[in-house]
Amino acid sequence: LAKTTQPISMDSYEGQEVNITCSHNNIATNDYITWYQQFPSQGPRFIIQGYKTKVTNEVASLFIPADRKSSTLSLPRVSLSDTAVYYCLVGDEHNAGNMLTFGGGTRLMVKP
Amino acid sequence: DTGVSQDPRHKITKRGQNVTFRCDPISEHNRLYWYRQTLGQGPEFLTYFQNEAQLEKSRLLSDRFSAERPKGSFSTLEIQRTEQGDSAMYLCASSLGTGMGAGYTFGSGTRLTVV
């Protein structure tokens, strides 16, 4: 599985847009990029997944450049409740095998 | 279906005691996973079941750990002779088939504290 690198932590204020970038230089042709969110004392929760260009859902947007060696999770107009750890994972969605490999994630703190 | 359920949510035990955790997956999911998460780290894979068969185990799963999934429904994770290093959050997840996206659902975990 491709290794990912993310900032350890980020601070933001309510109402701002937050962009969290993940590097995955060794991403393979069949790999997808998946982001999870984890609140304290809860399990990770799927946010968004993409293969290339841009994906948007009701929670976030995911931007993936043409070389796919990085990706950016964009959270529009964050609120205090978006304070969480965000994990970027890379793997073959259709043959992911049996485990998810998490890195250390990015700890986002949203301040009032 | 309310998702993946884990019981208990919290467990405090003395070193050397045995503990058992339970996970009830989403009913139609055939795959069930156990992960361990220590403070400040991402979850680490422990083991995985497809239906009732345990198909993969991590090197993290020492011989003091055993997991079962009788009849391919709920699963239990037992830790024998607990050590302080076993203190962690134990997460269960389930999925229908392969994939790491929306179909992969985690429970809220069992937090184990060994004193």
Image (cartoon, coloured by chain):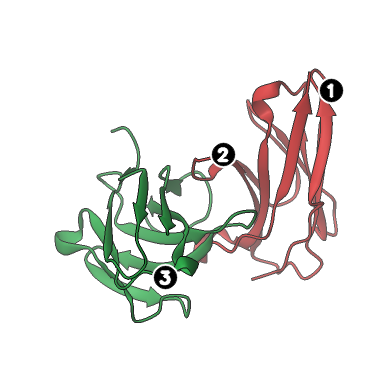
| Relative depth, front residue between B62 and B106 | B62
Quadrant of the image containing the N terminus of chain B: top left
Quadrant of the image containing the C terminus of chain B: bottom left
Task: Mark yes or no: residue A83 visible.
Answer: yes
Between disc 3 and disc 2, the foreground one is 3
**Apparent colour of chain B:** green
Q: Residue at x 58, y 37 (%)?
A: A39
C-alpha distance separating marks 1 and 3: 44 Å
Q: Quadrant of residue B53?
A: bottom left
Identify residue for label 1. Answer: A16
Identify residue for label 3. Answer: B83
Q: Chain of mark 2?
A: A
- Would residue B65 be found to the left or right of residue B68 on screen? right
Q: Chain of mark 3?
A: B
Label 2 environment density (alpha carbons within 10 Å; few <14, some 14–19, many ≥20)? few
Name the secondary structure under disc 3: loop
**Apparent colour of chain A:** red
- Would residue A10 be found to the left or right of residue A46 on screen? right
Q: As shown in the figure, which amino acid type bears the numbered disc 2? A: Pro
Label 1 environment density (alpha carbons within 10 Å; few <14, some 14–19, many ≥20)? few
- Residues at discs 3 and 2 in contact (Cβ within 8 Å): no
- Would residue B18 be found to the left or right of residue A27 on screen? left
Residue B34 pos. (x, y %): 40, 61
The vertical placement of A32 against B7, above or below, is below
Q: As shown in the figure, which amino acid type bears the numbered disc 1? A: Gln
C-alpha distance separating marks 3 and 2: 24 Å
| Relative depth, front residue between A70 and B75 | B75
Identify residue for label 2. Answer: A40
Q: As shown in the figure, which amino acid type bears the numbered disc 3? A: Glu
